[in-house]
Amino acid sequence: MATTSLTWTSDSCRRLLSCGIDSERVARFRRMARDRSRFMPFVFTSSERSRCRRLPDPAVGLCASFCVKEALFKALGSPYNFTDCEFLPGRNLGKGSFALSPRFAADHPGVMPCVKILAPVKGQCTAIVYLLDAA
């Protein structure tokens, strides 16, 4: 059995509360990207759907956005409304825009998420969400 470890360093003065990671196959989102009626409205906001449609590969954008939402869920350790988290991918996924609804902020006071998207490798997207102490 192989053991994997990760060391995270930061110049931030904020305390790391938790971390969530999610990785998905882009192929899982190909049909959804082609058939706009399958754009899961309970997962993706209208802004996310619109932004992904304009990307050269909409499936990559949908996959990245979904990974951010799942990684946030894992970092929180509790369910939340996925549309309260919005990741608007750019052509360079790492330069995407991340936002949380006021309702999310009210439900999770003192928590500041930071998002990192890894460039797709071998048809996989990966997102890492760090939850930092906002105080």
Image: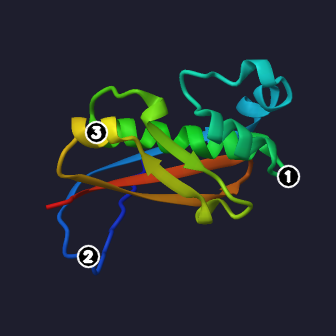
Give the vertical position of 6 relative to 76 (above or below).
below
Q: Which residue is mark 2?
A: 12
Q: Which residue is mark 3?
A: 76
Point out residue 51 in the picture as x, y percentages from the top left corner. Answer: 71, 46
Q: Secondary structure at mark 3?
A: helix
Q: In 3D space, how far apart are the residues under numbered discs 1 and 2 (Cα atoms)?
A: 35 Å
Q: Badge 3 local density, few (<14 within 10 Å), some, or many (20+)?
A: many
Q: Would you say 129 lies left or right of 30 here?
A: left
Q: Secondary structure at mark 1?
A: loop
User: Disc 1 or 2, which lies upstream in sequence?
Assistant: 2
Residue at the image point whose x is 76% and y is 26% from the top: 32
Q: Residue furthest top?
A: 37
Residue at the image point whose x is 20% and y is 68% from the top: 14
Q: Amino acid at mark 3?
A: Leu
Q: Secondary structure at mark 2?
A: loop
Residue at the image point whose x is 28% and y is 43% from the top: 105
Q: In 3D space, how far apart are the residues under numbered discs 3 and 1 (Cα atoms)?
A: 32 Å
Return the residue nearer the eye: 40 or 99.
99
> In the drawing, what numbered circle is on residue 35?
none
Return the residue nearer the eye: 85 or 12.
85
Q: Would you say 47 lies left or right of 43 here?
A: right
Q: Which residue is mark 1?
A: 56
Q: Badge 2 local density, few (<14 within 10 Å), some, or many (20+)?
A: few
Q: How is the image coloured?
A: rainbow
Q: Badge 1 local density, few (<14 within 10 Å), some, or many (20+)?
A: few
Q: Would you say 20 lies left or right of 76 here?
A: right
User: Disc 2 or 3, which lies upstream in sequence?
Assistant: 2
